[in-house]
Amino acid sequence: MKSQRTRPALRRALPPLLSCVIATALLAGCGGGGSDNPATATQAAAMTGTVATGQVVAGAAITVKDSNGKTVTTTADSNGNYTLSQATLAGLVPPLVIKASSNSGDLYSISTGGGTTNVTPLTSMVVAALSGQLPADFFDLVGTSHQASALINATAIANARTMVQNTLTAAGVDPTNIGDFFTAHIVAGNSADQVLENTTATLPSLSAFIAQLAQTTTQNNGGTPPSGGTPPSAHIDTSTYGGCLTDLTLNSPLPASVTTSTLSTLPDINARWIATSYQQSDLDGGGNTTWSASRGADTEGTNNAALWEMQPRQTASYLDSNGSLAAAVTPTRLIVRSSNGNPLAWFLNLDDYYAPIGGAYLGYQEHGSSDNPSAAGADNNYLSGFYYAAGQTAEAPLDGLTGSGQSYQRTRYQLNDGNQTPWQENYTVTYSGKKTITTPLGSLNVCSYTTKGTLTRPDNQVNISYQTIMYTAPTIGAVRREYSQKNSNGSGGTTYVMTNNRDLIGAVVGNTNYGQSLVPDDSTLESCLKSTTLPAGLASSSDTTHAAQSIYRLDKDLVTTYTSGTATGWEWRNSSLVIQDTPVSNQFYYAFVAGQPTRLSGGSDATNRYLVNGSWTGTGSVAPTTRPTGSNNGVMWALNGHTWLDPFGAPAGWEQDGDPNSASNAPVDGSYFQRVFYDPHSMPLVWFNGLRKGETITSAINQYEQNSWTTPGSVNQTVFQGAYTYNGRSSITTPLGTFATCKVSATFTQTQTGNSYNVTENDVEHHVPQLGAVYTTTDEIDRTDTANQGAITWANSKIKVLTGKLAGGTLWGSLANPAP
């Protein structure tokens, strides 16, 4: 398993859908309502405010213009704050329009008479929603048009602000924590600053968003801007990335053929991508391939070799070259369905980290999981990635990107490099133009930008070159990513190449799902569990006294014995099973190391207790098909079990020991034991939650057994093979109620080379969220009589039903012994 990264996989590129259906009352305010005259104030009050975008804009050039076109100027300080005294503003006749210019572009605001007036993307949005124009055009118009100045009144501003708030909320940006857009106190890291940061991070093109606001107002004013000026489509600079997206948003919006649905509840992911080409190869520097992995050229459907599921941005902690710091993280899960045609599913958790103040990119990590099959090489011990030197600044906004590009230099470090070797990174981001592409969502008009870069180790023995091309469509943002990478040694020989291209197949913007539904369904076991609910009438209670555990009653526990392949007797056990669900850490476990069973430290152990409270027995070949009635033999006995996990959380084996307090005439005593373990790091066989409906995955490992009924210390080795199938949704009735379930079936076989040893087990499990397996059937048949090849020697059939579950302080059912 290999996954290498040089730059963030995706910028968050999910711009909002701007509704063209705005409440009539709202439009009345921003469509020409209010007084025909400017505010009655004849003298502007002193003005203060902050220029910010999610980071303060130090040194911004501030221009304030009045209703007659007269201007005054000042410069924002290092915190983005500006101040204009009343004396400085003497002679200006309100209302006022404000522009703040900097290297990152222009921002706009308005004021009826001075006072506190911030200048931010949100105030620029209000200007667009109020006027029906691009803010720059409205700024130019004020002072030459009585109609334009008249729009700047308290009622119209309040209505425009409400329009912006509603539109942002629909896009997944919550602006409430900033309070009043114009007067909020903005300092780095406070709630107002975080709203601005989230707005900038969520919307890939503020220009397109602002233009769409203006166009919506214009359309709802009969096609004419309320200001009386030029419509937003009149002055679009298509030489920039932001201008390209603005042009598409206004003139070539997302086609109606793209499937949409309105969501009442948001899923936990907001985008899903599939691989169109995903290949990696190691080379020896001389052109010879030494290792390769291919995930094929995939199309939307059940055979996707790889897909990426993105989640909304969250808060997290992170390490840079100075140590731990707070950060924002965009989690993504890469799910690999097959490699080189091998249909073995596994996943990596990918995290891109950003500074919570200013939004600078901090670095990247990818993590494995103990849930992954061992063959993937991506267990809980796997960690890769990089981080940048402390004090990184954010890249310039993409909106202003041109064909000339913007270049950057960074110093970065690899995770797990104790020497903190500094790598030099140089890259350029360039606007690549507008085109039409065909994707799983259909034919889309897109704007693209290209990132080209190099990474060099100080000794020049490793050099990496890479290129990323991003394609962005109106409304849903990034729809395609094309990535390529080549690593070279000090002599220039190629040592690694990678192609990683992907297409968007589904996205959630606000409460609208575009393309493939991201709402959980029953397509995989994991998705089924996410979309299954517990019965409404299922009773629960609080229990903070006991440890987490699961209590099962065995409605069937039938053992049949055979002689020369013929059934000669049966035993129906009155039994139960208690599983302690919280493993105890720092415990011993077993593995087969260097040809020997070896006791290892550092694992964990979850205990269980199998209790038999008497049995019904009989002779002959005909066993009962239902639980016997009447008194049983009263012989009580128990097995105390252990389920081991290795230090990385993967299954390591199990053991059952006879309870020394069992009845004297019980079939087991304190000397009984059975121990099963594996080669180190060879489990699990499959990623269970990744099983797809109707798909069967088969895998095999060596299994080793020690027990009390064979030669002490000897090891019985078998080949253990499992075939797992997720069957989809089902339903089952248990003592706790009737459940909608997610059904999984499995067949296990144990064989030995060169003899007739064969054990087969068929399991069916019904899973539900929070409770786990609520109903399980198990049928085991042993054919281990070497003198009678193929003859059955022993069989056991079980039906196991959940009667009690304690998890997270909540108890469902009862902890009482269900087999009295």
Image (cartoon, grey):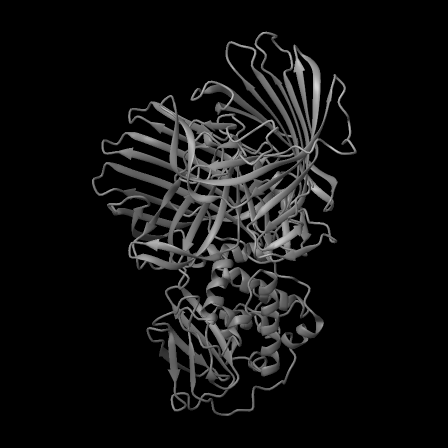
On the image, the x and y values in percent for residue 369 come to 47, 40
On the image, the x and y values in percent for residue 171 come to 58, 60
The residue shown at (51%, 9%) is 754
Q: As rendered, which of 556 and 724 lies closer to the eye?
A: 556
Q: Is residue 604 visible?
A: yes
Q: As rendered, which of 751 and 90 lies closer to the eye?
A: 751
Q: Is residue 551 left or right of residue 501?
A: right
Q: Is residue 217 left or right of residue 236?
A: right
The residue shown at (77%, 25%) is 624
Q: Residue furthest top?
A: 787
Q: Is residue 793 left or right of residue 191?
A: right
Q: As rendered, which of 741 and 550 lies closer to the eye?
A: 550
Q: Quadrant of the N terminus?
A: top left
Q: Quadrant of the C terminus?
A: top right
On the image, the x and y values in percent for residue 533 come to 68, 49
The residue shown at (43%, 90%) is 91
On the image, the x and y values in percent for residue 808 come to 57, 53
Q: As rendered, which of 635 and 185 lies closer to the eye?
A: 635
Q: Is residue 236 above or below residue 90?
A: above
Q: Is residue 351 above or below residue 281?
A: below
Q: Is residue 318 above or below residue 590?
A: below
